[in-house]
Image: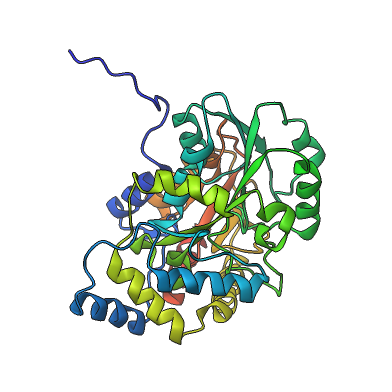
Amino acid sequence: MILLNSKLPTVGTTIFSVMSKLAQQHNAINLSQGFPDYAANPKLINFVADAMKDGHNQYAPMQGLQVLRELVAKKMATLYGTNYHPETEVTITAGGTQAIFTALAAIINPGDEVIIFEPAYDCYSPTVKLLGGLVKPFELHAPNYSIDWEMVKKLFTANTRMIILNSPHNPSGSILSKADIEALIKLTKNTDILIISDEVYEHIIYDGEQHQSVALYPELQERSFVVASFGKLLHTTGWKLGYCLAPAKLMTEFRKVHQFNVFSVNTPMQLGVANYLKSENVYESLPSFFQQKRDLFRLLLSETRFKLLPCKGSYFQCVSYSAISDEKDSDMAKRLVTDFGVAGIPVSAFYTKATDDKIIRFCFAKEQDTLEKAVERLLKI
């Protein structure tokens, strides 16, 4: 018999895969995983197809195509007034998750402590543990999922190496305020603590709010890896295309790992995206595009027995079912699929301790018809 000691003994199949499989088995409307059910812009598809036909099918440079890195740097300068050099401070990645994994792998050593805010995207904690780090979770709770920074400070030790931020936040839909950023600047001043800022939903923010990117603040930019996603921007989550920004000193370490992880990201999609972004200003239209969906979904859900939680960003709407049932959120989520034909995600899955506040997360990056049909079913509860 071959002996095997798992590096992640408590990790199983992700809740996203579990709920999507359950939705398929029961022919349910899948509002669990965060992907659109509508097509990307045909112009974008054509640009990628043209790149393939024109022979751009071999390895891209390890750091990504120059033209795409330059566009990313230009975007950051335009939107945030900050400069990232495309040669040394921008790297194209195979999606946001790979960028997060790579940044952690480049920095975290056994015994290093990483503060994360829960509910948290499910890759943060396992990656830290895989690298021998120690996860220091700070729990946030409904309805606002706000951060008490004075309490966060109590988690700091001599071994604190990194903080992972996520704004707009998955799964809660909350966003960081300027006051949050100012508190973070104060806490990290005169320390060697680094930051991973997961900003994959940066353009999906509502009601005229400004996205508080760490790139806006020199005190944070100098210690941060910023992670972003073309998949969220272009409605192409299956392409797994994103990027990472960091000061040259940090990016040097990032690329050391990146080159032995994926090495480079597929060439025709990089070129197609670059040509599309040259001709289409998609950044400005994205907030209103998704706000229409958010507002419609919230209006429809207001007729149900669920209580709506605030949604200031991302394309996720959380709801409380505490007035409907006292069952565990994992059981409630499964019953929504089996009995009512709608799949969501139990928010306890985003906590280390499976903290259950009776909250379900739904994705509204869907066609209007999909959302209407889903709520028709939820009205029967």
- Between 98 and 286, which is closer to the camera in this rendering? 98
Q: Is residue 32 visible?
A: yes
Q: Position of residue 301 (x, y in %)?
A: 58, 65
Residue 22, placed above or below residue 13: below
Q: Position of residue 339 (x, y in %)?
A: 40, 51
In the picture provided, is 306 more to the left or to the right than 243? Answer: right
Q: Residue furthest bottom?
A: 279
Q: Position of residue 123 (x, y in %)?
A: 47, 42
Quadrant that contains the N terminus: top left
- Between 194 and 140, which is closer to the camera in this rendering? 194
Query: At x 37% / y 59%, what residue is drawn?
Result: 240
Color scheme of the displayed model: rainbow
In the picture provided, is 48 more to the left or to the right than 339? Answer: left
Q: Is residue 366 visible?
A: no
Q: Residue furthest top?
A: 1
Count of numbered labels shown in the rendering:
0
Which picture quadrant has residue 369?
A: bottom left
Query: At x 47% / y 66%, what residue is drawn?
Result: 232
In the picture provided, is 205 more to the left or to the right than 208? Answer: left
Residue 42, placed above or below residue 157: below
Residue 305, placed above or below residue 77: above
- Between 69 and 162, which is closer to the camera in this rendering? 69
Q: Position of residue 212 (x, y in %)?
A: 69, 62
